[in-house]
Amino acid sequence: MQFGFYLPNHGPNAQPGPLAQIAQTGDQLGFYCMVAGDHVLVPNRIDSPYPYTVGGEFPTGESGEYFEQLTLLTYLAGVTENIRMVPSVMIVPYRPPILAAKILATLDVLSQGRLILGVGVGWMEEEFEALGTPPFAERGPVTDEYLRAYKELWTSPNPEFDGKYVQFSGIQFLPKPVQKPHPPIWVGGQSRPAIRRAATMGDGWHPVGTIPAATLEPEELAGDLVTLNRFAEQAGRDPSGIEISMKAPLYDPATMQSGPRRRFSGSTDAILEDVHTYSEIGVSHIIFDIRGSELNQSLERLDWFAGDIMRHVE
């Protein structure tokens, strides 16, 4: 089992100094990866339902403050040595495919092979419209085609592509990523199309779990993995080569409401037992949201997690 953590990309810790301290601390403590979310802008009015709250409200939309995801990770690659950078998830239709492939290849080269590309199709129609992307309703096919275009650009000495949304030929595309054949791709989302995309095009499946809007209890996850494995086998792929990297909150007992205990809450022993349960099902990575409102709080939580949880897990 490997562990990662969320980075702040808005709020008081989203400044060069605090971000560097958080990233360097996680690197020194032995975390496997750190993840950053993706919003280029936030429209003033959002009617699209957010998939990760029960009522569909977007919880951080009011401030409108977000660092550009890939720029943020490139900055942090320069101040760390071993920890991996994960756009989680990069909304694939937001960026022109050749430009996105170039930025990602550059990040992989500058980080000396520490990029893992988390991808998703997106949920906020208003942001799609403001960015002038291909139609929101076609975001699934757009994402599939862009991913195929990335792979062509990253692996072919003479890249060519002739699709509905992407066309190119007669170009050179260098440098190629350090990782061969290309950086690992973790496909986010819990829908059936997302699971199929992970099984057929991804190196990993990257769901969100243990939140009220997406509980993803072990039994549910086990059923989804049966579906994932079946899709992979139908595509002629070995399911054992697909990593399962789950994102989850780490609950503070002081903020818990009454009712049954949520996964990853309570005592250290209870959290370790939850980690073991998901590991037994097949989860290979868990990325926890352990952000704090103050820098010292964030650093202390990273240190606590490394000392009390990570060192007890194989």
Image (tube, rainbow, N blue to C red):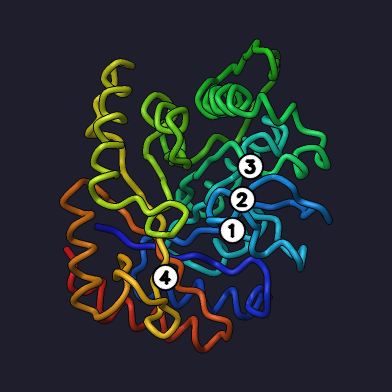
Categorize mark 3 by other alpha carbons within 10 Å: few (<14), some (14-19), many (20+): some
Distance CA(mark 1)–CA(mark 2) = 24 Å
Q: Which residue is mark 3?
A: 123
Q: Which residue is mark 4?
A: 27
Distance CA(mark 2)–CA(mark 4) = 31 Å
Left or right, residue 134 beside residue 182 = right
Q: Nearer the viewer, residue 50 or 18?
A: 50
Find the residue positioned furthest to the bottom: 296
SS under mark 2: loop
Distance CA(mark 3)–CA(mark 2) = 7 Å
Q: Is residue 286 above or below residue 251?
A: above
Instruction: Identify the mark nearer the N-term, 3 or 1.
Output: 1
Question: Residue at image x 53%, y 20%?
Answer: 156
Distance CA(mark 3)–CA(mark 4) = 31 Å
- Judge depth for marks 1 and 2 and give the one in front: 2
Q: Marks 1 and 3: in contact by CB < 8 Å?
A: no
Q: Which residue is mark 1?
A: 73
**Amino acid type, mark 1:** Leu
Q: Nearer the viewer, residue 252 or 13?
A: 252
Name the mark on residue 50.
2
Quadrant position of the C terminus in the picture: bottom left
**Amino acid type, mark 3:** Trp
Instruction: Identify the mark nearer the N-term, 2 or 4.
Output: 4
Q: Is residue 89 above or below residue 202?
A: below
Q: Marks 2 and 3: in contact by CB < 8 Å?
A: yes
